[in-house]
Amino acid sequence: MASSTPAAILPISNPDSSQQAPVSTPAFRAFIDHLSETVRSGLSTRRPWSELVDRSAFSKPDSMSDAALRIRKNYSYFRVNYLTVIAAVLGFSLVTNPFSLITLLALLAAWLFLYLFRPSDPPLVILGRTFSERETLGLLIVSSIVVVFLTSVGSVLISALLLGTALVSAHGAFRTPEDLFLDEQEPGASTGFLNFLSGNAAPVAAAVV
């Protein structure tokens, strides 16, 4: 009588939901693509730098009201250039302060990968401690307050923003706007780099969900 040999059982690996990627890759890629497109769109509307530094167009304002009017007109025309100058001053300040730069990047990465683009399942586990979504948000808020107000990051950011704003205001006050075609600007048009935080961020939010 022939002996029956048991059939070989092949191991089947079932994907565990706890091993899924901690970050939603499509949502993060959509955020990066949207941010890059926003920056390119903003830079494409900047004015020629030769107009910004045209020495023949500088003159002393007659009064404070004249200076304020010049600043408003020049900001309406050189908005993207001014934002670029402020961003350059901010970037230079962070590069010359490596601790502040590394701390700020670590805080930004924590917000992105632990809250904004992290799926709700599985819950966040750090050193054997499970954190809910509300606890994670509270921890990130407290960390942000500590970093901004109790370290040198806050002073570096505020000093850079004040310096950039002072440079832009000085240029706007002494730059004569009579030769600028201000009627080209559409009223209410947003050409800033951070307009993805407004209604344009809806596709990214949908991707996260």
Image (cartoon, grey):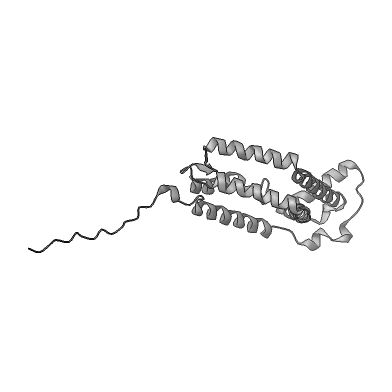
Q: Residue at x 35, y 52 (%)?
A: 14
In the figure, is residue 158 to the left or right of 188?
right
Toward the viewer: 132 or 8? 8
Give residue 26's position: percent from left, percent from top: 49, 54
Give residue 34's position: percent from left, percent from top: 57, 54
Q: Residue at x 91, y 43 (%)?
A: 63
Q: Residue at x 64, y 38 (%)?
A: 141
Toward the viewer: 4 or 144? 4
In the figure, is residue 17 to the left or right of 155?
left
Residue 182 appears in the picture as rendered: no
Give residue 193's position: percent from left, percent from top: 67, 52
In the figure, is residue 189 to the left or right of 128?
right
Toward the viewer: 90 or 39? 90
Give residue 42's position: percent from left, percent from top: 66, 55
Image quadrant assignment for residue 197: top right
Q: Residue at x 61, y 57 (%)?
A: 36
Residue 174 appears in the picture as rendered: yes
Quarter of the picture containing the N terminus is bottom left
